[in-house]
Image (cartoon, rainbow, N blue to C red):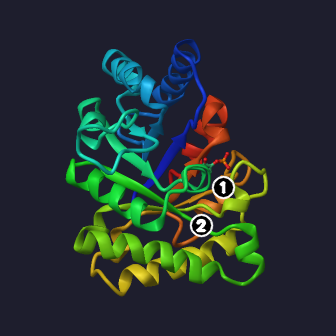
Amino acid sequence: MKKLIAGNWKMNGSLTANEALLLALGQGLERVPAGSLHCDVAVCVPAPYLAQVQALKASQPALSGIELGAQDVSAHDAGAYTGEVSAAMLKDLGCRYVIVGHSERRQYHFETDALVAEKAGAVLASGMTPIVCIGETLIEREAGHTEEVIKRQLAAVISANGHRISEIVLAYEPVWAIGTGRSASPPQAQAVHAVLRAGLEAVTDLFARVKILYGGSMNAANAASLLAQPDIDGGLIGGASLKAHDFLTIIAAAQV
Ligand code: PEP
């Protein structure tokens, strides 16, 4: 299956910096001969910049291969929810992907498994693909609870979304690896991805087509070995997605 390399810009950027980053990415992608980009690429940008990136994509052919994504969404359709952004609005702005359940949302905004599952449903209902993040904390890993935690997080998404589970992208992001410079080792990540694949196999015949991304300090140096694992179908990349050269190197590592 085609891998997916998705950048999560988090709360970074400015009109000027975004344009410079995207133009540098576009120049890098232009060097890839037409038709030979063998992975999907997306950037998940802060909501206020979605329109800017949409406009840049429309005016710069070199950016046509980069899909647009958002970092969060409301579980509600519309109405009196001040500050929230609906799935329909994101779709209107050209989003193809929406990250839901990022550990920073779970940790700082107290998002529960049930809310994350509901958000994934809202994204699917609007015709976009949710990138559903799951992963254990360091305390949970050290207590030997990794499998239990990720199975619980996945079960909530399955129970709320039924057969549509085959349309999501999953991202395994061990919380202790995010933004720490300490990535999971390729065998550590593969072991969890295999558990997730088995969990999907138990509920859908289409389990093999669900992309399971790894995220957590993936960078230009470690991407190739992580992406070579059989159940790692791409990466969700934070810090390294803000540096064009590093992000392009990760994209190049996903070409096989
Ligand atoms: C992320 O924010 O999803 C992430 C994986 O961050 P980083 O790559 O910086 O660890």
Q: Residue at x 32, y 37 (%)?
A: 95
The picture places residue 32, in percent across and down from the top left corner, at 47, 34
CB of mark 1 near ligand 1 (< 8 Å) = yes
Q: Residue at x 75, y 68 (%)?
A: 138
Q: Residues within 10 Å of mark 1 (few under 14, many from 20)?
A: many
Regarding mark 2 in the picture, which secondary structure is present there? loop
In the rendered structure, find residue 61 and report the number of the disc placed on it: none
The picture places residue 141, in percent across and down from the top left corner, at 72, 76
Residue furthest front as drawn: 80
Residue furthest top as drawn: 16
The picture places residue 67, in percent across and down from the top left corner, at 37, 37
Looking at numbered disc 2 in the image, what kind of residue is underneath it?
Gly
Regarding mark 1 in the picture, which secondary structure is present there? loop
Q: Earlier along the polypeptide chain: callout 1 or callout 2?
A: 2
The picture places residue 114, in percent across and down from the top left corner, at 40, 67
Looking at numbered disc 1 in the image, what kind of residue is underneath it?
Gly
Residue 104 or residue 242, whichever sits in front: 104
Q: Toward which corner of the image does residue 72 lie, by quadrant?
A: top left
Residue 94 or residue 140, whichever sits in front: 140
Residue 216, above or below 7 = below
Q: Residues within 10 Å of mark 2 (few under 14, many from 20)?
A: many
Question: Is 21 placed left or right of 33 in the picture?
Answer: right
C-alpha span from label 1 to label 2: 10 Å
Residue 102 or residue 3, whichever sits in front: 102
Residue receiving disc 1:
216
Q: Residue at x 37, y 64 (%)?
A: 117
Residue 166 or residue 229, whichever sits in front: 166
Residue receiving disc 2:
135
Question: Is 144 placed left or right of 149 in the picture?
Answer: right
